[in-house]
């Protein structure tokens, strides 16, 4: 492969995503705030870059997968950010879940530096990142998307084109997460009602999983609710609250009433106050059980 790829952010999602790019044959360089997390992929053949700017200097395309707006802004505009690099890369693909407002701002700043900025947030948990079966919501410059697609295909099975504005992919991802969490809340209430009514959740999983709710979202989260395996954490509860607050800001700006969004934020915040911020975000189901008098 002629395209030199850089990857920033080697967390539970980023590391397997980067590994799949490397397996796809792309020359890969990586950066992470803590080098220890990069040790395994360096052993597999990736090169190390000491700063985002150093990464940009040796790559054509950079992918970032970080936790929030502040982290993304730091690797872009910080003292050693990619915009400070002496050599300008051609494309920055942000795969993080961030605010649409930041996506618009970063698109403008990248453009001023001759760099295309794409927003490509993903849906899927770490196990899907490892399997290379993520779904990607892609938006930005059409020429840059064409260049980026072969790289993105190494991490995914579906890529959905959401237009020319990167902020559209960011907003779509926030709404996507809102729908997932809303369904988690619905499933947790139904499961609690069934348990108090003497019907096993395992039977519910069998019936619903083979009829009305034979869908990835059900098969992913209903077993977690049944086993109450929240501490294993695929998507941390505190990150879920971050996303809901970002969507609330968008709803306030657009004057869109979202009462369920408010309820979900309350349950996430209450869960955090109970020391569950690192649990999987489906741990909001614990509150449903506790309010119903179940252990």
Image: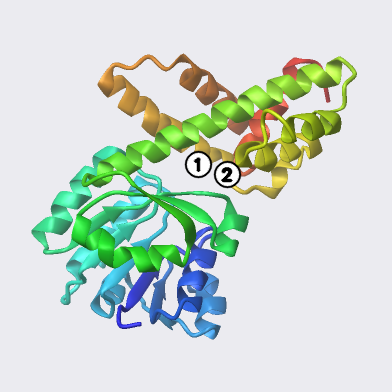
Q: Quadrant of the C terminus?
A: top right
Q: Is 1 situated left or right of 135 in this image?
A: left
Quick one: 225 or 277, which is closer to the camera?
225
Quick one: 158 or 15, which is closer to the camera?
158
- Label 1 sits on a secondary structure element that is helix
Mark number displayed over residue 239:
1
Q: Is 117 situated left or right of 28 in this image?
A: left
Q: Residue at x 57, y 77 (%)?
A: 40
Q: Mark 2 — residue?
A: 236
Residue 87 seen in the current view:
yes
Relative to 180, residue 127 above or below: below
Q: Residue at x 62, y 57 (%)?
A: 127
Q: Residues within 10 Å of mark 2 (few under 14, many from 20)?
A: some
Q: Are marks 1 and 2 in contact (CB under 8 Å)?
A: yes
Image coords of residue 93 (percent x, y): 31, 59
Q: Quadrant of the N terminus?
A: bottom left
Image coords of residue 16 (percent x, y): 54, 66
């Amino acid at each position: 492969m002629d395209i030199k790829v850089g990857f920033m952010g080697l967390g539970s999602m980023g590391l397997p995503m980067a590994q799949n790019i490397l397996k796809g044959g792309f020359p890969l360089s990586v950066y992470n705030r803590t080098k220890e997390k990069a040790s395994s992929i360096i052993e597999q053949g990736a090169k190390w870059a000491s700063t985002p700017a150093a990464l940009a200097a040796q790559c054509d395309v950079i992918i970032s997968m970080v936790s929030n707006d502040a982290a993304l802004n730091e690797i872009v505009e910080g003292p050693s950010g990619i915009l400070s690099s002496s050599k300008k890369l051609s494309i920055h693909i942000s795969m993080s879940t961030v605010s649409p407002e930041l996506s618009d701002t970063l698109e403008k700043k990248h453009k001023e530096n001759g760099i295309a900025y794409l927003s490509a947030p993903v849906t899927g948990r770490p196990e899907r990142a490892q399997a290379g079966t993520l779904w990607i919501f892609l938006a930005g410059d059409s020429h840059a998307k064409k260049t980026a697609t072969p790289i993105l295909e190494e991490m995914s099975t579906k890529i959905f084109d959401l237009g020319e504005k990167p902020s559209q992919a960011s907003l779509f991802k926030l709404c996507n997460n809102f729908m997932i969490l809303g369904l988690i809340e619905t499933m947790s209430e139904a499961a609690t009602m069934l348990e108090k009514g003497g019907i096993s959740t395992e039977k519910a999983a069998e019936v619903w999983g083979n009829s009305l709710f034979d869908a990835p979202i059900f098969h992913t989260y209903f077993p977690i609710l049944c086993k109450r395996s929240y501490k294993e954490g695929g998507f941390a509860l505190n990150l879920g609250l971050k996303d809901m607050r970002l969507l609330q800001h968008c709803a306030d700006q657009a004057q869109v009433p979202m009462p369920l969004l408010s309820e979900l934020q309350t349950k996430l915040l209450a869960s955090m106050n109970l020391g569950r911020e690192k649990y999987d975000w489906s741990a909001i189901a614990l509150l449903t059980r506790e309010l119903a008098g179940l252990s």
